[in-house]
């Protein structure tokens, strides 16, 4: 089977969710079967397995994207997998697996700020109705998503007639957090600052916590959004905007973290949660369908818009026995997710398409 994996969404600076999903799933697939990676930046090759076969294509936001299948036909792939749903399929002569990570942008159609203006406009228009998504997904032979919660929403809104397979996220098998020896009073948030992420609540919760807590906002952020959030910081409280960190810096932060926090109202998965759990860091997250699935029943939850409830959950971690229980339950929960298992599911799906 000539299996092609679309690695063009891998970022060479700082992983976002799609980038990490592409990198880790791609590595696991390559460990189990021959694979050819599609890249659009030479730097992406450094994040793929050594010696991986690659094909250089245009970027996924290029005006050439609708004609991607015509370019791929010349390489005679049997199955092509892409971690999003936007790959052009015009004239394809291969099996195609598209991915719908989540339906977040139907609830909040604000596009990511790092996209070109014409893509942002198209993004917003695209998410004003369900029928464009149906047309896109039904171009494929199969559809992948990352969680049972996302699959249930795709089915609820009848976004595709194609079979839906869950190929879940997982913590990196290479995740190794340095032993700090002591737990500090550092709170960590990893993720974007889009409105649905509800980061405001994390900052507001500091007003109900002792002043020695420090909130670390790890991810890149634009100046306007940073100014908005900075204006919410309670007097005498500390918030550090890291504006993006290296993997080593991120792991160092986790090594001394008191807890990882997220108040997001909607997600497709929530990879930082299982990464923190695997690292032995307590997780406190908003009580939503997806986090109940991903974080497990023994995590600490709070209503998404209630900073007081978040602060009270943090206070429970002052009890060493409670903290140890949450850490142990988190490690057991994170073990449910494995990139090797996800790669096996994806390859089984690809083989089944060929056998039809």
Image: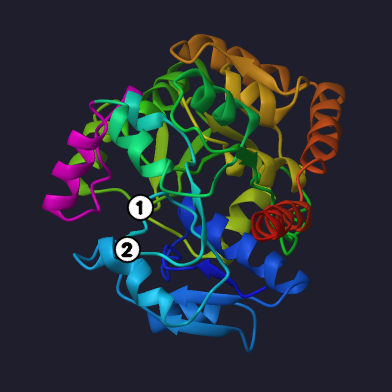
Reading the chain from its start, which is encountered first: label 2 or label 1? 2
Q: Residue 266, how many percent across, how many down?
A: 46, 25
Q: How is the image coloured?
A: rainbow
Is 123 in the magenta? yes
The quarter holding residue 313 reads: top right
- Label 1 packing within 10 angstroms: few (<14), some (14-19), many (20+): some
Q: Residue 327, how many percent across, how many down?
A: 80, 34
Q: Would you name the residue on which mark 2 appears? A: 60
Q: Looking at the image, do the residues carrying marks 2 and 1 touch, with CB atoms under 8 Å apart?
A: yes
- Label 2 packing within 10 angstroms: few (<14), some (14-19), many (20+): many
| Above or below for 55 versus 311 | below
Q: Residue, x 47% and y 35% (percent of image)? A: 102
Q: Residue, x 40% and y 57% (percent of image)? A: 244
Magenta range is 107-128
| Above or below for 132 versus 34 | above
The reply, left or right, for residue 37 in relation to residue 113 is: right
Q: Residue 25, how many percent across, how many down?
A: 63, 60
Q: Is residue 235 visible?
A: no
Question: Which type of secondary structure does the marked residue at label 2 adopt?
Answer: loop
Is 31 in the magenta? no
Q: Residue, x 68% and y 41% (percent of image)? A: 274
The mark found on residue 20 in the picture is none
Q: Would you name the residue on which mark 1 appears? A: 86
The quarter holding residue 20 reads: bottom right
For the N terminus, the quadrant is bottom right
Between label 2 and label 1, give the one nearer the viewer.
1
């Amino acid at each position: 089977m000539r299996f092609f994996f679309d690695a063009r969404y891998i970022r060479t600076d700082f992983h976002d969710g799609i980038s990490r999903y592409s990198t880790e799933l791609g590595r696991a697939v390559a460990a189990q079967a021959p694979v050819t990676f599609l890249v659009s930046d030479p730097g992406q090759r450094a994040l793929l397995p050594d010696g991986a076969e690659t094909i250089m294509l245009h970027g996924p936001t290029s005006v050439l994207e609708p004609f991607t299948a015509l370019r791929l036909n010349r390489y005679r792939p049997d199955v092509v997998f892409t971690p999003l749903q936007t790959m052009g399929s015009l004239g394809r002569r291969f099996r195609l697996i598209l991915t719908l990570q989540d339906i977040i942008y139907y609830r909040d159609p604000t596009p990511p700020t790092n996209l070109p203006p014409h893509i942002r406009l198209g993004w917003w228009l695209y998410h004003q109705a369900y029928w464009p998504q149906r047309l896109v997904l039904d171009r494929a032979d199969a559809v992948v998503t990352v969680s049972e919660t996302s699959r249930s929403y795709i089915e609820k809104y009848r976004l595709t007639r194609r079979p839906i397979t869950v190929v879940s996220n997982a913590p990196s098998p290479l995740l190794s957090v340095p032993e700090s020896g002591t737990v500090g009073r550092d709170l960590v948030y990893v993720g974007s600052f889009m409105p649905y992420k509800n980061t405001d609540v994390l900052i507001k919760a500091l007003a109900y916590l002792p002043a020695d807590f420090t909130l670390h906002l790890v991810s890149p952020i634009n100046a306007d959004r940073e100014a908005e959030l900075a204006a919410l910081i309670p007097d005498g409280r500390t918030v550090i905007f890291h504006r993006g960190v290296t993997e080593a810096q991120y792991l160092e932060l986790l090594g001394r973290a008191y807890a990882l926090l997220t108040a997001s109202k909607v997600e497709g998965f929530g990879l930082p949660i299982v990464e923190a759990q695997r690292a032995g860091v307590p997780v406190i997250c908003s009580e939503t369908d997806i986090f109940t699935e991903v974080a497990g029943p023994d995590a600490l939850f709070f209503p998404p818009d209630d900073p007081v409830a978040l602060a009270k959950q943090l206070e429970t971690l002052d009890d060493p026995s409670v903290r140890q229980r949450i850490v142990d339950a988190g490690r057991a929960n994170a073990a449910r997710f494995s990139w090797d298992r996800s790669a096996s599911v994806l390859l089984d799906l690809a083989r089944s398409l060929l056998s039809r």
